[in-house]
Image: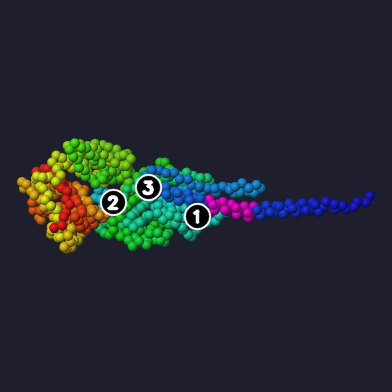
Amino acid sequence: MTLRNDTRGVSEVVGAILVFGVLIALLAVMQTQAVPAANQQVEFEHSQDVQGDFAEFHAAANDVATGGDRESVSIAAGTGYPTRMLFFNPPRVQGSISTSENRTVTIQNAQAVDPEVDDYLNGDDVSLGSRTLRYDVSYNELGNPPQVRYEYGILYNQFRGDTTIQNPGSVIDDTEINLVFMAGNYSRTAGDTQSLEVRPVSAPSRPVTVEGKDGNNITMVLPTELPVEDWQELYGDQDHVTITDATGDNIKIELDGDRRYTLKMAGLGLEQGVDKPDAHYIVPAKEGVTDVGAGGNVSVAFEVRDRYNNPVAGENVSITLGGNTKFVDTNGEGKAAISVSPSTTGTATGKIVDCTGSDRCTADFNVNVISPGGSINPSGGVRLQEAVLATSIENDLGNAIGGLNPWTPGNNEGDAVDLVFSVDDNLEFDGVRVNYYASSDDSAPPEEWAMTDGSSTISGEISGKFNSSSSLDPSADLQVAFTDGSGSVVSASTSDYFVITVILSNGEQSIYFASPRTN
């Protein structure tokens, strides 16, 4: 039997094999090129979403630092890829949100202008803890993604060899210093959206006026992951600011010590259980002086603060006045208060119960009883006849002002005010207090006063305590001058007015409203 070759159907089989091969090759190209490209786009879009989320975090952190109420923010920590039939995707991208190790911030030569706050901010080194908030991610396809950093209120991205600022914050804004610190050892790694609750650890931030001790520059040494060149670009173009490298991963900011600055600091955390700073010092609430009249009651209040100058709630405070002591817990605003009636006068002393061995643990609040005997512009005793703008300052007064800030005698009407009184029964002023000064324009009112009768001179803070260091003779006519916080004379105007309360040598009190006129 003879066999013959049969090639029928061979072309169809070969064609099918070739089509299958082309399909496999196409799938391979899609898997190795198209799918990675599509996934890279997904990762890029996720990176953009993260940038937007951290912009919202920055805004929320500022709100918490300013207002003291917690806020929640969602961060898309990771991302996944869409399902693709016949193709394989890598695992979900996971991002890490964490805080760095705790590092020490040092503030040097900062002295508070307020004498009570000066018990804490007295020019000595102040050490505070802070951390950097980090977001790190490693994508499967997108190379060199931005790693987000947040420190001191600055939001920025780190790349390999480069940094971009997303929000510059306001660490140094002319004469304002704003520092936001992160606290707590936080660490979360996830492939989905995470909800961060921004909590006040030390907030709301209280403004404190500071200056360089003895005129020396205020220095801040800040641990940072941001290069010094970026710090210089952000804040170094201000004449009173110098920024240089310091040892380790620190930068040093020097501020002109001849200026005054408003310092605000706040501490934030991201989870429950973050240790809050302890109570560190106490100050009188408001100006530390209160007047109480007949039939009335007022409160004497103290505020307990932490190392960041912010209020501490739930702290036990003892308040002693007139030989009696009461124990009061501070409220949510860090204040402890007692009620005072006209039968009580003297100095109230507030003390943090668990604080020992330092002036910062106590503060005084002066209570003035203005009734009985506290008549306004009295018709008898000592009567204010007139107040006249002076063209020169008396020597004793000039010397007192010169002790604050060199004063050059001139012929400037309004440098001082002459007060002319009509006096009965040889009365004197055993105590003087300037309650209030109202300026006629939008300029800041003076902060201090000095008064002389030609032989004795006394001075004090406006709205401060009575000065009873020596008696003044109103029959000799008096002269009073006003200065700003640096000791420079503030010229009075005929549109201004001020209020003076005096304790007479017979024990009575009188109040005078004076609006000076030209001579």
Question: Mark 2 touching mark 1, by CB under 8 A?
Answer: no
Task: Say what secondary structure mark 2 lies in.
Answer: loop
Q: Tell me if mark 2 has few (under 14), some (14-19) or many (20+) residues whose alpha carbon lies within 10 angstroms of its own.
A: many
Q: Find the magenta span and give its range.
A: 31-46
Give the SS element for disc 3: helix
Q: Work out how far the residue at label 2 is from the one at label 3, CA to CA, in angstroms.
A: 21 Å
Q: Earlier in the sequence, mark 2 or mark 3?
A: 3
Residue 65 is tagged as 3
Counting from the top left corner in percent of width and height, residue 153 is at: 40, 52
Q: Amino acid at mark 2?
A: Leu
Q: In this image, 418 relative to 19: left or right?
A: left
Give neighbour class at mark 3: few <14, some 14-19, many 20+ (Cα, 10 Å).
many
Magenta span main SS: helix
The residue type indicated by label 1 comes to Pro
- Return the x and y of residue 62 as percentages of the image width and height: 39, 49
Tell me how far mark 2 sits from mark 1, CA to CA: 39 Å
